[in-house]
Amino acid sequence: MSMGFSEKYDVVVVGAGHAGCEAAMAAARMGLKTALYTINLDLIAQMSCNPAVGGIAKGHLVREIDALGGVMGEIIDAVGIQFRLLNTSRGPAVWSPRAQADKKLYRAKMRQVLESEPNLRIKQAEVTDLILEDCGAGDSPEHLESGAQKPRQRVRGVRLLDGRTVQADAVIITTGTFLNGLIHCGENQYPAGRSGEPPSVLLGEAFRRLGFEVGRLKTGTPPRLDARTIDFSKFEVQAGDPVPTPFSFRTKSITQPQTVCWITYTNAETHRAIRENVHRAPLYSGQIKGIGPRYCPSIEDKIVKFPDKLQHQIFLEPEGLDTNEIYVNGMSTSMPIDVQMAMVKSIPGLENADMIRPGYAIEYDMVQPTELYPWLETKKIQDLFLAGQINGTTGYEEAGCQGMMAGINAGLRAQGKPPITIDRSQGYAGIMIDDLVSKGVDEPYRMFTSRAEFRLHLRIDNADERLTPLGYQVGTIKRKDYEAFVEKKLRISAAAKFLLETRLDSRSQLGRVIYTRLGLMVDGHLTAPSPLTGAQLLKRTELGIDDLMEWVSEGLKGLGRGGSRTAPTEDPDSLAGTIHEPTALSREEGRRVQTDFKYEGYLQQQDRQMERMKRAETRRIPEWFEYGKVSGLSREVVEKLTKVRPLTLGQASRIPGITPAAVSLVNCFIEIFQRRAAEQSSGQSVSAG
């Protein structure tokens, strides 16, 4: 091996959590020889905290991972034991799936999927350092020449604790909470990556040595209880949906046996136990230095910050079908174990509960994500990518989404191709990454639907239309899955065409029912000037697609392909010859059509807003641009712009503290400096002549 390397891969991924699994699968599916290194092979994709996937906005991220060819959606569909579609009382923009997982099965299924990928090798070893070399004059990728500072070094591989060295064209770091991890449980603290596993100290120190801006964040987990010692009759039962909503577009049905969760509340006794011992809480004693997640606070934080609130909701969630372990969602804590026991036993139904595992908090190192380009490559070191909690996020879904994008871009780098990015109008993945690289973090970042400017366009039902062509283009979507996607588009297009062009006959049985419900039938006669089209009917608040589904399905039967029902133009391989006739719509496809008609005006308005945003994104800021030479910019604005080095005016506008006036000034001075440069160049040419 060159330079004495023990092994060589195209892409090396460090850490087999949710980011690492998606990164490794993405690179491997692109045809690259990939290695995934983890400290413990038996804990791949471990759910260290909540045994669940999805939730508000998080479900959107999982759908986007799936649309790009990732595996998280398929895994949870295979092992989920309770599925719920959240926010259905509101508009479809914020509907989001959530599922309880069988924790053990999730790990096993993920490992099975990883091991079935022929281009992927999984290795148990600790990575302790990065192997670097200086960049030559011509080493910088072409896509950096117009807008970004060029790195001085590039990564060549990694060094393992046992002394081996591994060569790689690209390296992805997805270490989660392991970098200099420190667990707190009451007055006790000890180094760990998570409970029962050692931290990654040497690699953490390597990032500091290399000059990265490293910070400390904190997260936590609640106690786990023995179900045999719980009186569940005291709790409210929370059942899943009768018809589960899958996460993956490729899942036909959910076959795993389903179970229930339970809801209870804290009370005055719970709060008293916490208040009397808050001085022993690491969070308030000064023991914990890292910043915790604002939107997932510990129970002691809730009691202190909301003293007037008499109770807090608690969910009891099973960790699997063949275990007695119960996760106490809502009671994340690092209080001493005796206080944790008092808190638990204060709740009716838990008086005799046996605590299997205590809750704890963990502090860990992270790298400020302003150190990254929008494709998740570090600015300091070429070919080095970061994904997951190391970038300051919290949550399996946020990590998985970053892992997917880092895996794709590391794969493209290894292939000598330019990276891809997802913009804010394309997906929640783009919003999250743009927020991270533009704003940085001072607390763990969690995704919310409120972070999206164009929520109605970024729904769970159209994630495949937004992102699957991109996945197929880079190689993470298989041909058969892309063909299924094209067929789905044909069905939706055919259904929309049918609804636009076909009027519901008032003499038909369905017509009489529908028009009577709308108050448009008197004595069996239609009072409207003419029968309404399906599109017009769907815009009525009294009706939904379920009322018309049978009629639409009948209308699609026997229709030949033609007109708008040819294969989509984004299909790079002309799949039209392999696509079948449109068939009946699925329930979700019907909802997709309904949303487009019911919210047509709002969607058109957002289309215009997205065009304005895209124009700002196309105006790039040259690499040579010096913000200090822009008269009128404050010192604070100059410092922020110089630190982040935004690639476009759009990205600059989203940096905290950067006003529209400042962006306008930068735009003006770009034009001035470019005009001067052009005049000087022209003058030199004339002089030379």
Image: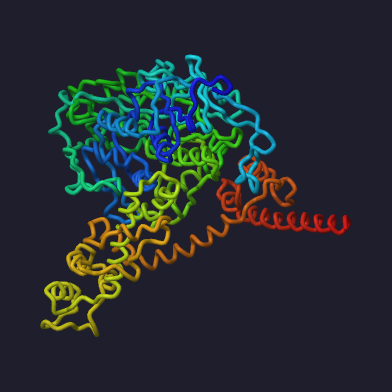
Where is residue 188? Give x, y as percent. 40, 15
Residue 190 position by quadrant: top left
Q: Nearer the viewer, residue 299 or 547?
A: 547
**Residue 533 in view of the camera:** yes
Q: Nearer the viewer, residue 235 or 142?
A: 142
Please identify the quadrant where the C terminus is shown.
Answer: bottom right
Q: Is residue 336 left or right of residue 80?
A: right
**Residue occupying image coordinates x 37% and y 48%:** 67
**Residue 291 in view of the camera:** no
Residue 578 position by quadrant: bottom left
**Residue occupying image coordinates x 30% and y 70%:** 497
Please identify the quadrant where the N terminus is shown.
Answer: top right
Q: Is residue 577 left or right of residue 198?
A: left
Q: How many marks?
A: 0
Give the image's coloring scheme: rainbow
Q: Is residue 184 left or right of residue 205?
A: left
Q: Quick check: 609 above or below 165?
A: below
**Residue occupying image coordinates x 17% and y 37%:** 259
Where is residue 326? Give x, y as percent. 23, 28
